[in-house]
Image (tube, grey):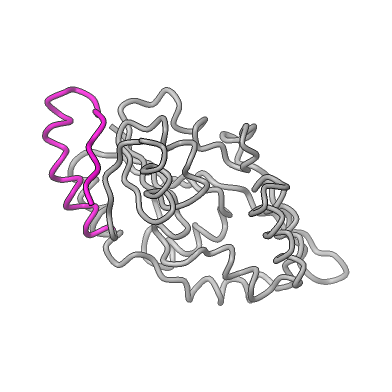
Amino acid sequence: MQVFSDFDGTISIQDVTDIVLSHFADPEWEEIEKQWKDGLIGSADCMRRQIALIRASRGELGALLDTVAIDPGFKSFLDYCRLAGLPVSVVSDGVDHFIRHVLLRNGIADLPVIANRLTYRLVDGREAYALSPALTAAGCSSGSGVCKCHVIWGIEPHIYIGDGRSDFCVAGMADIVFAKDRLADHCTDHGIPFIGFADFTDLRSKLKAVLPGIARQGRAVPQSQIA
């Protein structure tokens, strides 16, 4: 069994990309965000256009990313998964550099991360940034930069953990879904079985409770909603 988790708003307390954009991007990024929320563009197009608007050095980016907090229970959750023999990967429609920086800052260096790839080059003496899809997760039918369904396809059994819009499609094909916030609402509205959680301390407890049943079945089975 393998565990896949979203990052922004799930592992991190806040959306890291939004933090970076609000500090360093030209104001146009908010209009692009509105176009995405209105369904006029996909998230891949949205992110590429927004990242290009960042006006900051790599040092300035790093200093801001150093301030991003993760769920206090996440490291204990990882420790539990390692003891239980459950590989954990981050699957995010966010930015790989941002995610890896935040994880490393919090003492997590060996977690696989699948996310949009950040590149930079010098233009007129300053850094210019660009975004491209993860090599293993391009071609999303819903317009995301990272096709989470493609990432988990064929890997059984598996657990998916998420909180938001980029998790909607993948929740319908996961063996077990742990959901909160908008993802929990989506699962409720569409009849997708899920286990609700408040944070990773709560999630660890609930995962520990369902694992024996999964082991007896030999694979994951749909779970009833747990508030």
Residue 38: x %, y % from top left: 67, 52
20 is higher (above) or lower (below) than 4: below
Magenta range is 200-227
Q: Residue at x 25, y 29 (%)?
A: 220
Q: Quadrant of residue 202?
A: bottom left
Residue 202 in magenta stretch: yes
Q: Residue furthest right?
A: 124
133 is higher (above) or lower (below) than 50: above
32 is higher (above) or lower (below) than 161: below
Question: Toward the viewer: 35 or 147?
Answer: 35
Picture quarter with the N terminus: top left
Question: Toward the viewer: 165 or 219?
Answer: 165
Question: Toward the viewer: 155 or 217?
Answer: 217
Is residue 72 left or right of 93 when viewed as pictured? left
Residue 85: x %, y % from top left: 22, 38
- For the stretch drawn in magenta, what is the main secondary structure? helix
